[in-house]
Image: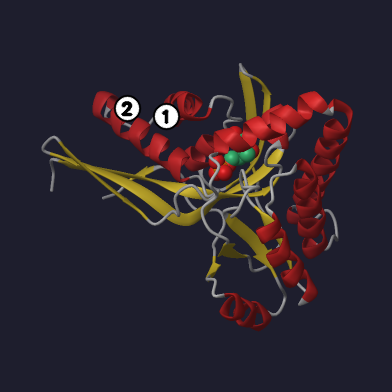
Amino acid sequence: MADTLKVSAPGKLIISGEHAVVYGYPALVAAVNRRLSISLARGKKKIKSNIPIGCGMGSSAAYAVATSAARTFLKNKKLDLGEINKMAYKIEKKRHGNPSGVDNTVSTYGGLLWYRKESEGLKTFSSIKIKRSLPKIYIIGTGKPVESTKEMVTRVGKLYRKDHQNTEIIFKEIEKITRNFLQYLLGERVASFQELIKENEALLEKLGVVSSFTVRLIREIEKIGGAAKISGAGGSKNKSGILLVYHKNANKLKNFVKREKLELIKIQLGEEGVKIEK
Ligand code: PMV
């Protein structure tokens, strides 16, 4: 219908760098084939989404981006990505206090991004063209964390103040891994994707953002020859949101999720950013 405006924005998966990115370290993040859409027709708003809510897949950022896109389109009759991203960041700030801006940026621009918040006034990012075929990545939901992103970021903030030196060491280690992932994707380095996920997860556990429930699941995945990490803010009390999972033999993962009564979802990275749906 001509008087209907429909915009959609993708969810995301942080490959590496969550939490550290809040402190100016880089993050590698991908838009994924899960989207939220907003339809506006005759003053009514309809929201549809297949992004799991509050699980680390950027559902709230996708909402902020889609809302900002609808607003700017109604005003200017075009999608100004820079404007949308700025507006969405403001919405994210109200909700979460101290966001890095990575979620709204990847949901706006899509693809695979190298992102860095140099300071509040300077956030840089580059789109990455992958030079090799990506390993098959799956997600497994551990369940919705009881803590919000804001609470998890605050938790890491407390650790940062209390044990500044060690937390900086962890962030620096995370940065090394994020860089190794980048070089791997650019075809500049022969690294084990699986090993990088495993090392990244170990550091996130040191930050205290992975619950014992989730740690047990991840150790099981490692025992059957795979690797998994939380992706996003995590959760330390009970569930920790989604896991980014890799195993060269998908059947082993299928058996694992069956045993644990969980769901295995194959995910596509590099989805298009915010757009008008025809
Ligand atoms: O869990 P999510 O989708 O809200 O991701 C948050 C990512 C953090 O690095 C933990 C916070 C941020 O603002 O970057």
Residue 134 in view here? no
Q: Measured from the top left, where is residue 160 in percent x and y? A: 77, 28
| Left or right: residue 219 compared with residue 108 | right
Q: Position of residue 182 (x, y in %)?
A: 75, 48
Cα gap from disc 2 to disc 1, whole angstroms: 7 Å
Q: Nearer the viewer, residue 116 or 165?
A: 165
User: Residue placed at 80% from the left, 53% from the top?
Assistant: 202
Q: Is residue 195 above or below residue 100?
A: below
- For the residue labelled by badge 2, is the local secondary structure a helix, a strand or a loop? helix
Q: Which residue is mark 1?
A: 84
Q: Residue at x 37, y 49 (%)?
A: 36
From the viewer's perspective, is 260 left or right of 169?
Answer: left
Q: Do tag 2 and tag 1 residues touch (Cβ < 8 Å)?
A: yes
Q: Return the residue found at the far left.
A: 42
Q: What residue type is disc 2 on?
A: Thr
Horizontal and vertical percent position of residue 15: 67, 51
Q: Quadrant of residue 100?
A: top right
Looking at the picture, tell me which residue is in the foreground, 207 or 19.
207
Dot 2 surroundings within 10 Å: few (below 14), some, or many (20 or more)?
some
Q: Which mark is residue 72?
A: 2
Image: 86 above or below 244 = above
> Can residue 92 be spotted in the picture?
yes
* Ligand 1 under 8 Å from disc 1 Cβ: no
Given residues 8 and 159, the one toward you in this image is 159
Q: Is residue 210 above or below residue 115?
A: below
Residue at disc 1, secondary structure: helix
Looking at the image, in which quadrant does ligand 1 appear?
A: top right
For image coordinates 49% across by 42% down, the residue present is 107
Q: Looking at the image, is mark 2 or mark 1 earlier in the sequence?
A: 2
